[in-house]
Amino acid sequence: MRIFLACILSLGLATSGCAWFNGGDAAEAQTPSAQPQEEVVVAEVVTEPAPPVKPAAKSKAKAKKAPRAAKGAKSETEIRAELDKMGHKLVARASRTVLPSATAKEVRKDGSGYVASYVEVDTSNVTTELRPGAKGQYVGFIRYQEKVYECRGSSKKAALSAPCKQVRARRINELIRYDGKAWQF
């Protein structure tokens, strides 16, 4: 960073001078005895070793890379849209793979009877939230509900075929990370 700042200072002094060093328009109005001092300062700055050249090359490279990065960089609204799409996709996957499900109920003995239970993911109630992080990274929150159903019967077979009632709902909050290119889960 220091080398970069020294390069900028030296280039500024070499090309246009500086009022601090009697450069620019102020040098023309002064006596000839002040101009040799300016030339000595400029000669010292210009004759520095290679470090001013390297940062200048790096700054050109950074200047060339910046527009490319700007073209590939996504706006926050695009990232938010991707989060919504990814959130619905993940909740749909959770709905398909949750266990116990309506087709594979879990049966347990409860007192003198049996209880068959299963979980259903509510795919219609998905919300997402985007929070910015550091260096182009974001954190996404995917919120949805899992509904727990129970069916009661006097035997396992009766519990599996009995009508089910929703006994509770769980709010699920999943975190997902955007690394600057894609959502990571």
Image (cartoon, rainbow, N blue to C red):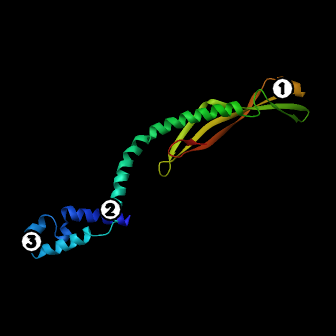
Residue 173 placement: quadrant = top right
Count neighbours of disc 1 (C-alpha within 10 A) and say few if under 14, some if 14 to 19, many if 20 or more: many
Residue 43 placement: quadrant = bottom left
Q: Quadrant of the C terminus?
A: top right
The answer to whether the residues at label 2 and label 1 have Cβ atoms under 8 Å apart is no
Mark seen at residue 30: 3
Q: Which of 34 and 175 is in front in this view?
A: 34
Residue 183 x %, y %: 55, 41
Residue 143 placement: quadrant = top right
At mark 2, the secondary structure is: helix
Q: Mark 2 points at which residue?
A: 53
Mark seen at residue 151: none
At mark 1, the secondary structure is: helix
Q: Mark 1 points at which residue?
A: 160
Compared across the picture, whether 82 is left or right of 13 comes to: right
At mark 3, the secondary structure is: loop
Residue 34 x %, y %: 12, 75
Q: In which quarter of the image is the N terminus?
A: bottom left
Q: In this view, does 74 lie above or below 60?
A: above
Compared across the picture, whether 119 is left or right of 34 comes to: right
The amino acid at mark 1 is Leu
Q: Nearer the viewer, residue 184 or 124?
A: 184
